[in-house]
Amino acid sequence: MMSRTLDLNHNVQELCTEYPELTGIMADLGFKDITKPLALATMGKIMTIPRGAAMKNIPMKNIVDVLRAHDFEVAWSEDGDAVQEQKRERQTVPDALSRKDMLKSYVYRLMQGEDLEEVRKDFVINFSDVSAIEIAQAEQELIRTGTPVSEVQNLCDVHSALFHGATQAEKIARAEEAVQASYQAQQEQKQVADTKENKSGVRLIKKTVHPDRLSGLFAPAGFEQNVMTQMKEMTQEEGHPLWILHQENLRIEAQLTQIEKAAERRDDEALKALLQQIKAVAGHYGKKDELFFPLLKRKYDISGPSDVMWGVDGEIREELRNVSENPLQMQDRLTAVLKRMREMIYKEENILFPLGAQYFTDAEWYSIWRDMPEFGYFGIEMAQVPVWRKAEALKMQAEQEAGERSGAGEKSSEVQEQGGKAAVSFPTGQMSAEQLRAVLNTMPYEITFVDDQNITRYFNEGEKLFPRPLSALGTEVFDCHPPKAKPVVKQLIEDLREGRRDFMDVWMPKNGEPTLVRYMAVRDENGKYMGVLEVVQKMGTAAAHFSEKA
């Protein structure tokens, strides 16, 4: 038989490509993931057999004996060669392996249970910095190639912990802090010298100067400096959407610290009150879930944050509800959810914000800003939110883009003139567009219409239990739902479309009041499906009325 030599310096993917039968042999030895194409294409590119054996605590001698029994020649000795090879492996990564593939492999290793610090060692060796888009694309690629969203989502916090201190946003911030500290020290030294020279003995007033323009000189090489500079400017520009989210994060972090201190004191009353307050974080999450993620996914094909972070936001909200009743009896779960919230702040500031700064146009920022009040503000009174100075200048451009997207300007054949104004004719009468708008807004319901192409076309105006951003108009209704809910929404619409049902009722408590949400199929006079009407109605008044009668 022809000699078959295994070079343990080669990675697992190379060996399995050269000897396909090796895949089954290694799987029988305990390397089950080797049979998964995704694992072989990611982990396999940076993993050697000795290193995998060390990770899984499988003796190399057992592996070598099995390989030799299958007529492989294996260069290996029991005097520690494998351990030395494992150390050498850490220092080199195949040149052909792209940064995205490497990041993807690190995330995959964490998902398989490898210790965070072990993965971090490799990450630090091979990466001096990492951009927000690289992180998003790595998780997105894992999902695209078959990894369930739930698996990526479950370890979302661990993934972000891997990148702590290495994102471009953090490195630029540290560089700028160093510049500021150096500059401040120089100013103080100069001030002391000037004071000594001042014959009057009066201490001179120090003039504050912000050397922002110098900080770029100290940023590590390879940074998308323009993007990071833009992001910083946006978080400092009063009223800008990133300024608002950043200010909310500062308040959320302060609230988390108060909760942790109350838990340490075992102050049950204060703890419950603080947890009740922090539930308002739902509005903060709602702004990015419904204003940022759909836009990133729909227009820029960046689905990683939408598929992963949106789901984590929902889990945090649910867990806050769970622990708020008896927090001291659920201390471990409380600590865990607070940690997840801090990790979410990190991901927003270092991944989501840079993505927005890199991609969103001024008109898109305006649309986000316009819709933010629908979700409220965490720790900031509505009246205290400063007006974004650029808003008026961007309004016309944003409305033009929104009009093109939703098909604005098209006249229906049913629109006629009534007293010189546009009117809509029905078999049972006619109303001006102005009257129709007023009637729909007067109804004691929240009404949303989604057409037969699953496009959100209309919702009435006014205060709502469920926020409806204008940016949702003209987009697929599925973009307005977290990944976990999308399959349910798709199935419901399909059932209504095919006539398997005509409506579905969902009862739920909302803001302490019983609420009915009814989804109804809309059909023309011939039974042709035209879309879905969602009607939200508060039922607290009705419940109180009938309980009094009883």
Image (cartoon, grey):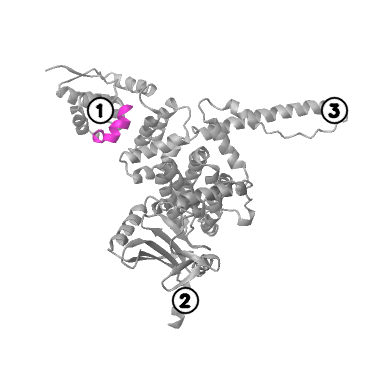
Work out whether mark 3 precedes mark 2 in sequence or the reverse, and give the earlier one: 3
Disc 1 element: loop
Task: Classify the position of the N terminus by image quarter.
Answer: top left
Which is more toward the observer, 525 or 33?
Answer: 525
The kind of residue on which mark 3 rests is Asn
Q: Which mark is residue 544?
A: 2
The residues colored magenta run 33-46
Task: Classify the position of the C terminus by image quarter.
Answer: bottom left
Percent coordinates x, y for residue 260 in the rendering: 52, 49
* Residue closest to the far left: 1
Q: Is the residue under label 1 in contact with that under label 3 (CB below 8 Å)?
A: no
Disc 2 element: helix
**Magenta highlight: main SS:** helix
Question: Residue at image x 55%, y 66%?
Answer: 420
Q: Does residue 378 appear left or right of residue 104 in this picture?
A: right
Work out whether mark 3 precedes mark 1 in sequence or the reverse, and give the earlier one: 1
- Eyeballing the image, is 300 above or below 458? above
